Image (tube, helix red, strand yellow):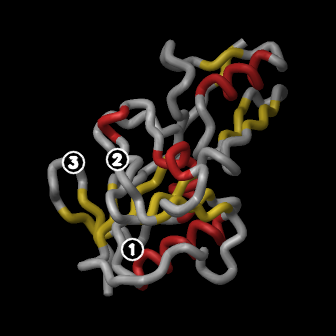
Amino acid sequence: MASEFHSRKGEAENNSQLPLSALLSGRALPLHWHFGPPQSVNMSSPPESFTGDWVTPDHSSYPEAIARWAVNAERRAKAVAFVKSPQDVATALKYAKQYSYPVAIRGGGHSTSGASSAEDGVVIDLSRHLSGVRVDPVEKLAYVGGGAIWATVDKTAIEHGLATVAGTVNHVSSSRCFLSD
């Protein structure tokens, strides 16, 4: 069964070829995946082999896990999967697909449209464990995790005498990075 994601305009697009590297880098992210009508399943425990943090509504950090920069963009997800690796992303996607839960990807959580939230679905959150930044000062390249925000990118670049060329709001997610000296 091919999965689909829906853009803001509502058109369905095939995402069966979307590489995990695109998810982890913040590029080419679909807004939401829908796999059909959800099935009822106890989601209080993470899928087997999931190594990240699995947060459900009964967890004390749930309100923080679903919080977004724009309050109107918060959605009550069935689970928030703070992934640690590409394998965790694949596990969470497989789990959501198996039980037909909608999926959203959260990088920095700054989307005012709610694209980083999934009502009664699974949020794959890159912000906790995949937000690292590494700079190669010789090549003037930054390697930025999908959950990184510009503040982290800026601070890391400055340590090497470099600066990012980006917007002026540093608490938003970064998906590409350009450095200059």
Q: Are marks 1 and 2 in contact (CB under 8 Å)?
A: no
Please tell me how crowded label 3 is: few (under 14), some (14-19), or many (20+) other residues with Cα within 10 Å: few
- Give the SS element for disc 3: loop
Type of the residue with mark 1: Ser
Name which quarter of the figure residue 178 lies in: top right
CA distance for labels 1 and 2:
19 Å
Please tell me how crowded label 1 is: few (under 14), some (14-19), or many (20+) other residues with Cα within 10 Å: few
Q: Are marks 2 and 3 in contact (CB under 8 Å)?
A: yes
Type of the residue with mark 3: Arg
Q: Which residue is mark 2?
A: 115
Q: Nearer the viewer, residue 180 or 27?
A: 27
CA distance for labels 3 and 1:
19 Å
CA distance for labels 2 and 3:
9 Å
* Label drawn at residue 108: none
Name which quarter of the figure residue 154 lies in: top right
Which residue is found at the position 78% from the left and 32% from the top? 135
Q: Nearer the viewer, residue 32 or 63?
A: 63
- Give the SS element for disc 2: loop
Residue 117 image offset from top left, x and y in percent: 39, 50
Q: Are marks 3 and 1 in contact (CB under 8 Å)?
A: no
Which circle, 1 or 2, is nearer the viewer?
A: 2
Q: Which residue is mark 1?
A: 16
Q: Which residue is mark 3?
A: 8
Name which quarter of the figure residue 72 lies in: top left
